[in-house]
Amino acid sequence: MPGGRLTQQERRQIALGLADSLPYAEIARRLDRPTSTITREVMRNGGPTAYRADLAHRATERRAHRRRHTPPPGQGAPAQGAGRDEEAVREYEEAFTTLLMQQGLPKMTARVLTCLFVADAGSLTAAELVRRLQVSAASVSKAIAFLEEQGLVSRSRDERRRERYYVDDDVWYQSTIASARGTAQVAEIARQGVDVLGRDSQAAARLANIARFSDFISESILRAAEQAREVLYTKPGVPCTKPGVLSAKPGTVPGDTTAPDPDRG
């Protein structure tokens, strides 16, 4: 298989393949490239619906230019773990960041969260994030504040009194619970509209269906998240002690004391 960077012509063929709804594996076969190469290329340049060959080519040139001017380890970003392909790690971080952006996170927030995820310790200081991302301290601070509000990161001071930001194995559980809570709120506001618009109206019937659907999805997500958390993080024979696990009745958010609505559904 040919090595090296993708050419502009290859990127145009990728764009044509995406327009024809070809799977990544088929595009890769036609270009005689690994499927992983095509996947990373598309994901770090807008995803399958937003990929543009010329924009992707220019973005790659800009990234290459930045890398040539990145300070060496000790002066700039922290060094990667021994034996890792730094180019592959950077490409993976770009793909992960793009995915988080497609899920709704702002770009800087997605970059900060990705850095924390791929750090071996699961934590970095503000100064380390600034050096790694080559951005201002204010940009990092704003992103961290947003992630804290979402329950995705935590902070503490280390032995040198520096603020250190953390993610752990529990972060995806917390994110899933937040998503389920948002879906439950959709159900609640839809139910309110049923009475406001009149139960016999077509609009009320539509909102009632939205409420039932959202209730079902929210409750299913909560049950699945709690069960998965117990299975994945509990050692055999040891009761799960993580807060919130299987402590909430189906259809409720852990810690939510709101009584169930007798008219729901």
Image (cartoon, grey):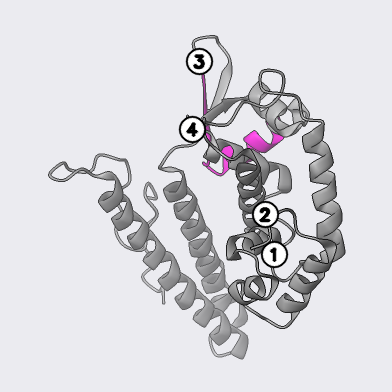
Picture coordinates of residue 103 (x, y %)?
62, 58
Disc 2 crowd rating (10 Å Cα; few below 14, some 14-19, many 20+) is many
Please state which amino acid type lies under the numbered disc 3: Asp
Query: Which is more toward the observer, 261 or 221?
Result: 221
Residue contact at pointers 1 and 3, CB within 8 angstroms: no
Q: In the picture, residue 192 is in which quadrant? A: bottom right
Q: Residue at x 33, y 46 (%)?
A: 244
Q: Earlier in the sequence, mark 4 or mark 3?
A: 4
- Cα separation between marks 2 and 4: 21 Å
**Which residues lie in the magenta part?**
141-158
Circle 1 is placed at which residue position? 47
Disc 1 crowd rating (10 Å Cα; few below 14, some 14-19, many 20+) is some
- Cα separation between marks 2 and 3: 31 Å
Magenta segment includes 142: yes
Instruction: Left or right? Give the position of 57 relative to 46.
Output: right
Tag 4 secondary structure: loop
Q: Residue at x 66, y 74 (%)?
A: 27
Residue contact at pointers 2 and 3, CB within 8 angstroms: no
Q: Residue at x 44, y 65 (%)?
A: 218
Q: Residue at x 77, y 30 (%)?
A: 70
Picture coordinates of residue 259 (x, y %)?
36, 58
Residue contact at pointers 1 and 2, CB within 8 angstroms: yes
Instruction: Left or right? Give the position of 27 relative to 191.
Output: right
Query: Which is more toward the observer, 168 or 196?
Result: 168
Circle 4 is placed at which residue position? 120
